[in-house]
Image (cartoon, rainbow, N blue to C red):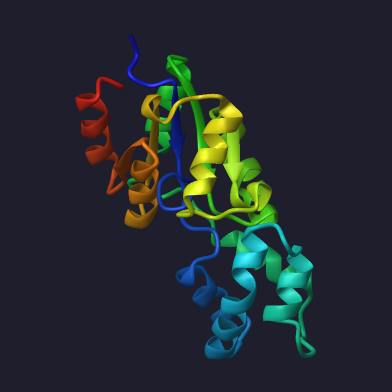
Amino acid sequence: MFPFDVILFDVGGVLLTNGWDHRERAAVVELFHLDPAALEDHHAKAFEPWERGEISLDEYLDAVVFYEPRSFTHAEFFAAMCEQSRLLADGAMCILKELAASDKCMVGSLNNEARETHEFRVEKFGLRQHLKFTFTSCYLGIRKPDPQIYRRTLGILVKSAERSLFIDDRLENVAAAAAVGMKAIRFTGADALRRDLQSLEVL
């Protein structure tokens, strides 16, 4: 019998680059000649509500960038944000495709991301072709590593933690998944993940 009923991948840091982490913000700050300290200060207050779906993209940008007049628009700034997304070098996309094609279990994602960047990235990189479902903080109203995000996801899927595998690059998220009873792997690269999955008889 296949060892898991469901395998959940994180997206940023496992399949793709992070959508709007400090490196991405620094690149866009430089492009628009903004004050990096000011943007980071405003971002720290508005980012988690945006990722939990409590505020919209425009509300986030108003709080973080457009609290004073700018020479560019919301749309131009968001386009620059989206341009930062790439396939992750040494990422797990090939492994995701292999697992999805095998059809031996349910394969999906569980990530922290705001709705607008999440929907752009899912469409841009064709993730719907390989993921049966996407669980995201903006829709669940909870962010990893809160244990409730894992419990709620498994509850919706009607799957047990013991028969579920979670893959994430952040140690705190992996530890939280393991604490609720899931098998959890910290992603450090495609080759290491392949070895881990082979040892679990997934590949």
Q: Would residue 116 be found to the left or right of residue 41 on screen?
A: right
Q: Residue furthest top?
A: 1
Query: In this rendering, does residue 126 appear at all?
Result: no
Marker count (numbered): 0
What residue is drawn where x is 54% and y is 73%? 25
The front one of 166 and 81 is 166
Q: Which x, y percent locates residue 77? A: 70, 71
Dividing the picture into quarters, in which one does residue 132 lie?
top right
Residue 170 position, x and y percent, is: 36, 55
Q: Is residue 77 left or right of residue 142?
A: right
Asked if residue 74 can be seen in this view, the reply is: yes
Left or right: where does residue 76 sit relative to residue 153? right
Percent position of residue 162, x then y: 37, 27
**Quadrant showing the C terminus:** top left
* Quadrant in which the N terminus is drawn: top left
Q: Position of residue 154 (x, y in %)?
A: 52, 32
The answer to whether 108 is drawn above or below residue 123 in the figure is above
* Residue 27 in the image: above or below residue 79: below
* Front one among 34 and 63: 63
> Is the residue 188 above or below the residue 166 in the image?
below
Residue shown at 57%/85% (left/top)? 41
Q: Residue at 63% across / 50% down in the picture?
A: 118
149 vs 166: above or below: below
Q: Residue 75 occupies which quadrant of the picture? A: bottom right
Q: Residue at x 54, y 86 (%)?
A: 36
